[in-house]
Image: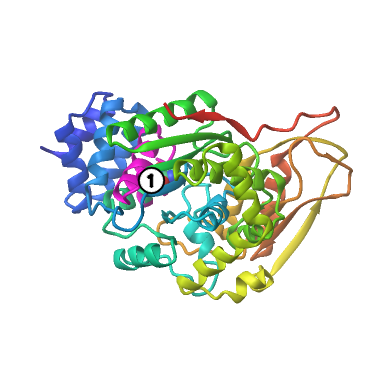
Amino acid sequence: MRTVDLIIKKRDGLELTTEEIQFFVQGFTDETIADYQASAWAMAVLLNGMSDREVTDLTLAMANSGEVLDLSKVVDIALDKHSTGGVGDKTTLVVEPIVSACGLRVGKMSGRGLGFSGGTLDKMESIPGYRTNLTKAEFLAQLKDLGLVLTGQTGKLAPADGKMYALRDVTGTVDSLALIASSIMSKKIAAGAQRMVLDVKVGVGAFMKTLPEAKKLASIMVSIGRLAKRKVVCLLSDMNQPLGYAVGNALEVKEAIETLHGGGPQDFREHCLDVASHLLVLGKAAGTLAAARKKAEATLQDGSALERFRKLVAAQGGDVSYVDDPGKLPVAPIIKEVTAPKSGYIKWIDAQIVGETSVEMGAGRATKEDTIDPAVGIVVLHKVGDRVKKGEPLFVLHANSQKSLKAAETRVLAAHKWSAKKVKRLRHSYGVVDK
Ligand code: URA
């Protein structure tokens, strides 16, 4: 088999066989297929799509490209959550501690930023010392002893996904339904998850721009789950405007800590409670979503979720004093509050523009080698539907140079659209797909 023939076949819109997909994944993993060929192949998949059978084959080949964890000796039900990626999406930082405070064990392997969406690992690394590279033995030991882990995917788990993810980030091949579904499900299967909540983001700041696309992605992932004997619940949630207010690594960690203190932005808190409730039901810590939500809420009120977050940070080598005093987290040298250029109702805050701007300011990567500046980012101060008067604060920029500040100011101002008439607030959720 020749790699170039597989690229041509996909370029011409033809279906690859199971053997061809396995050959490609194997070759990409052991580096007999070069990055440039894999990039061309990924672009062909993005442009021409894949059949459900091809996506399932790709998922299983990527899941089996390395070790597959068996968590059955450590947990009764191996739970996991994953987001398809959004702007200001710091949900894991709050949901994992809630679920843990409700008595379930939860170990998660998260990713880095992808395209304009932020990554949980990049956020957690704003806390000095926090290790995101636990070994398999460390992961299992911490899951057993503390019942809570948040680390990166070890190189040995689904290595094909790890490599493909990094390549897609810098080759314009992120937003392919087939590549997203196989990326997420291969990781989850390899990490041993038996039951999972997948947070499928919908809107301009998500990889799935429309509800039908998001539903299609959700149903592919549910059906991959069925084939692989995993229970998958997909939540369809809004990503037209940033989730919460903060976008940027340390800024998001601060907002997550505020939420763990029982405060935080209302939309973000709601979303976290929603995701946590589904996990609690899947993990049998609650019989109904209503009962689960009560339990989850209580952990934010009584400080037990915050305490679990502290324990998590300490267990992974992070300096807990940054959790106790988030003011110590990295701060950008230039902070500028930008005011509203006019009075009116906000009818749109384009999450993709906000996400891209934050990446351009240094919160994400343009090439695989780029390093992240944890301090930079954007704090929007409003939500769609808010009435704002001319001259009132609209957003705050945290920048590391005047040049980046200026460019960001223009872009984020343009991301805000106005209406003279009252505007409806955006929905937070568009339903659940689990069948
Ligand atoms: N999250 C993933 O893990 N992979 C993708 O491709 C997109 C979001």
Task: Tell me the residue at 88%/49% (across/down).
Answer: 391
Quarter of the image with the N terminus in it: top left
Where residue 187 appears, as percent x and y from the top left, is 34, 47
At label 1, which amino acid type do we have?
Arg
Q: Position of residue 134 (x, y in %)?
A: 36, 67
333 vs 208, nearest the viewer: 208
Seen at 53% across and 38% down, the residue is 206
Q: Is residue 425 above or below residue 305?
A: above
Q: Residue furthest front?
A: 287
Q: Give the quadrant of the C terminus.
A: top left
Magenta highlight: main SS? helix
Secondary structure under the numbered disc 1 in the rendered image: helix
Q: Residue 148 falls in which quadrant of the image?
A: bottom left
Residue 46 visible? The answer is yes
Q: Which residue is mark 1?
A: 168
Position of residue 290 in the picture relative to residue 222 (left or right): right
The answer to whether residue 191 is magenta is yes
Going by the image, does 153 lie left or right of 33? Answer: right
Q: Is residue 308 left or right of residue 282?
A: right
Quadrant of the displayed image that contains ligand 1: top left
Q: Residue at x 71, y 46 (%)?
A: 266
Q: Tell me the magenta residue range.
A: 166-194
Q: Nearer the viewer, residue 281 or 269?
A: 281
State whether residue 373 appears in this view.
no
Ligand 1 closer than 8 Å to label 1 CB: yes
- State the residue at coordinates (60%, 49%): 296
Q: Residue furthest left?
A: 1
The image shows residue 354 at horizontal and vertical percentages of 63, 46
